[in-house]
């Protein structure tokens, strides 16, 4: 029986996942050799939405290229050797850390041929970067093919691009329109598309120009094809030993619990929240410091702060917060997850929001722990370690008095549009039999009447946002799964919550769970994928509305 495109795509995802694990355990591979061929073939079969024109023979995918380059270290396109490492002491070396714009990780260019990339956020991060690199190598082969003939002879457009890049790297002026004309032939796109994308790359401060990126990708492909100078991806032995052992999650969680202990907060009621690091700060202290007494007031203030209003409201809120129970815990472990602690007993006000009064007795007032977004499997590692009892230096154990766990995330929506809200009642982990139904304290009625689309149902926790196409997503939405969206952390958080509350019993069995996501993209809608750009100001309302509703549920 002939397989459907959805079945072929799901098989390709599984093959990618298995191959990546195998290559990781092996220690190294050549991405355009026999070992990397399986990744290339599977990615071409899958042809993810985020990579657009990947499967076309000559056209370079431009939006996908910008998306990827903003998540990889600047200059990686020039390096033959890419080595994924753990945190191994390079932060104390003289090598300057290169931090990608859209993915917080330390990277080090050790010489002109080698880039070392720190991977401290678990397997999901490794699969993510390997997928992006495979995309780059596929595109580099297209560039080589567009710039040479069957005998390896270089055409005029490549020769002229080489001269343009030499001028750019030496700081000389050159005619950009002429350069775009040469480049358009090399990447198989129109002059208009090329010129527009060149401007987008120039507007991004954390990537090289499109001229340089295309040139160096093509140059490495030519060197490998014509001179035998193979490219290689490798994994350090320390990284292979540490992945899956919660090394960084344990360091991260212990520091947070130590701060709670040292501030006398370890026994207090605790509300744990995974969210961004601005909405809870601005919502709670905006109400208290500026007298914002409605959601509309809070939303407008957040909008003004987001667009860089010239008044001092953001500074006023922050200064007030520091005097009223606000504690920042900056990450030093490598997880790249900063934390805010909000001690409601240290507040001079007695309301969190209008109508949300705090208990009169200070010892009954809770602590709100807000942690920045985790990435994929890292969510389980960090949450699992955080929910375990704290062990003091004297060897005494202090179980945390966790009252609730709230997750506000961003996700791809299947049934609505960017900026809408999804309320999950179960998470299914893609490619496994793992599923996590749960009682969500949030529901549809909480979000009605605010002018946003709201959907409730099953959400899929996927292996990576880069590993999805319309065939798979349509199947998830239209089959009996009735999925409303996809994200990368939900099942991992639930795994930690359920294992700690129901199996290890580190926290109470009836811990409240609140989940809500805002739609950062619609992968089924052309022009609305993650590669089409960030949500921007359209994300302010759903972000602050979810924050507002979580606080209402916790304190009314």
Image (cartoon, rainbow, N blue to C red):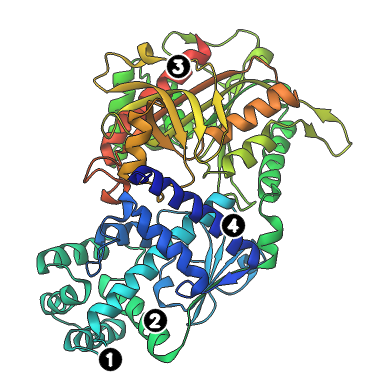
Q: How far apart are marks 4 and 3 (CA)?
A: 37 Å
Image coordinates for residue 247, horizontal then vertical, percent: 70, 50
The residue labelled by disc 1 is 151
Q: Do we see residue 277 in this rendering?
A: yes
In the image, is 105 to the left or to the right of 207?
A: right
Q: Position of residue 261 (x, y in %)?
A: 74, 32
Mark 3 secondary-structure assignment: loop
Looking at the image, do the residues carrying marks 4 and 1 touch, with CB atoms under 8 Å apart? no
Residue at (20%, 88%) from the top-left corner?
Answer: 155
- Residue sitting at x 16%, y 76%: 185
Horizontal side of 525 relative to 347 (left or right) equals left
Q: Residue 220, labelled with which disc?
A: 2
Label 4 or label 3, whichever comes before in sequence order: 4
Marks 1/2: CA distance? 17 Å
Percent position (x, y) of residue 148?
Answer: 25, 85
Pointer 4 residue: 21
N-term mark: 3 or 1: 1
Q: Residue 442 shows which numbered tag?
A: 3
4 or 1: tag closer to the N-terminus: 4
């Amino acid at each position: 029986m002939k397989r459907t495109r959805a079945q072929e795509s799901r098989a390709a995802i599984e093959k990618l996942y298995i191959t990546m694990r195998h290559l990781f355990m092996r220690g190294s591979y050549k991405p355009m050799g026999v070992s990397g061929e399986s990744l290339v073939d599977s990615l071409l079969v899958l042809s993810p939405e985020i990579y657009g024109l990947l499967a076309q023979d000559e056209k370079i995918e431009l939006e996908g290229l910008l998306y990827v380059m903003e998540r990889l270290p600047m200059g990686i396109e020039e390096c033959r050797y890419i080595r994924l490492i753990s945190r191994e002491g390079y932060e104390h070396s003289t090598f300057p850390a290169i931090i990608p714009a859209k993915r917080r990780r330390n990277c080090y260019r050790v010489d002109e041929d080698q880039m070392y990339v720190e991977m401290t956020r678990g397997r999901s991060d490794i699969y993510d970067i390997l997928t992006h690199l495979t995309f780059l190598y596929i595109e580099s082969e297209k560039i080589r093919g567009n710039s040479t003939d069957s005998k390896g002879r270089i055409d005029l457009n490549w020769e002229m691009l080489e001269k343009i890049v030499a001028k750019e790297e030496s700081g000389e002026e050159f005619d950009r329109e002429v350069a775009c004309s040469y480049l358009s032939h090399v990447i198989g796109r129109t002059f208009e598309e090329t010129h527009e994308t060149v401007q987008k790359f120039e507007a991004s401060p954390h990537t090289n120009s499109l001229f340089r990126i295309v040139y160096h990708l093509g140059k490495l492909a030519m060197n490998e094809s014509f001179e035998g100078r193979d490219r290689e991806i490798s994994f350090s032995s320390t990284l292979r030993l540490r992945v899956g052992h919660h090394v960084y999650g344990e360091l991260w969680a212990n520091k947070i619990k130590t701060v709670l202990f040292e501030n006398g907060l370890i026994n207090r009621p605790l509300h744990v929240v995974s969210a961004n690091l601005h909405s809870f700060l601005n919502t709670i202290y905006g109400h208290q410091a500026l007298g914002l007494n409605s959601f509309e007031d809070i939303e407008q203030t957040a909008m003004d702060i987001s667009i860089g209003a010239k008044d001092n409201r953001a500074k006023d809120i922050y200064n007030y917060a520091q005097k009223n129970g606000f504690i920042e815990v900056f990450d030093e472990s490598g997880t790249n997850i900063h934390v805010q602690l909000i001690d409601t007993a240290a507040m001079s006000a007695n309301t969190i929001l209008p109508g949300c009064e705090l208990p009169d007795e200070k010892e009954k007032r809770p602590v709100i722990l807000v942690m920045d977004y985790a990435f994929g499997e890292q969510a389980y590692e960090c949450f699992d370690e955080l929910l375990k009892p704290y062990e003091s230096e004297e060897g005494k154990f202090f179980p945390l008095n966790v009252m609730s766990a709230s997750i506000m995330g961003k996700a791809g929506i299947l049934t609505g549009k960017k900026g809408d809200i999804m309320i999950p009642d179960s998470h299914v982990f893609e490619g496994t039999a793992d599923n996590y139904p749960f009682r969500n304290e949030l529901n549809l009625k909480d979000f009605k009447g605010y002018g946003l689309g709201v959907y409730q149902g099953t959400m899929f926790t996927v292996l990576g946002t880069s590993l999805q196409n319309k065939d798979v997503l349509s199947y998830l939405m239209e089959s009996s799964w009735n999925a409303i969206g996809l994200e990368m952390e939900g099942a991992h958080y639930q795994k930690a919550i359920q294992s700690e509350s129901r199996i290890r019993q580190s926290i109470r069995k009836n811990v409240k769970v609140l989940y809500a996501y805002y739609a950062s993209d619609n992968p089924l809608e052309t022009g609305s994928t993650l590669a089409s750009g960030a949500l921007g100001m359209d994300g302010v309302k759903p972000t602050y509305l979810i924050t507002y509703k979580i606080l209402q549920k916790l304190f009314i």
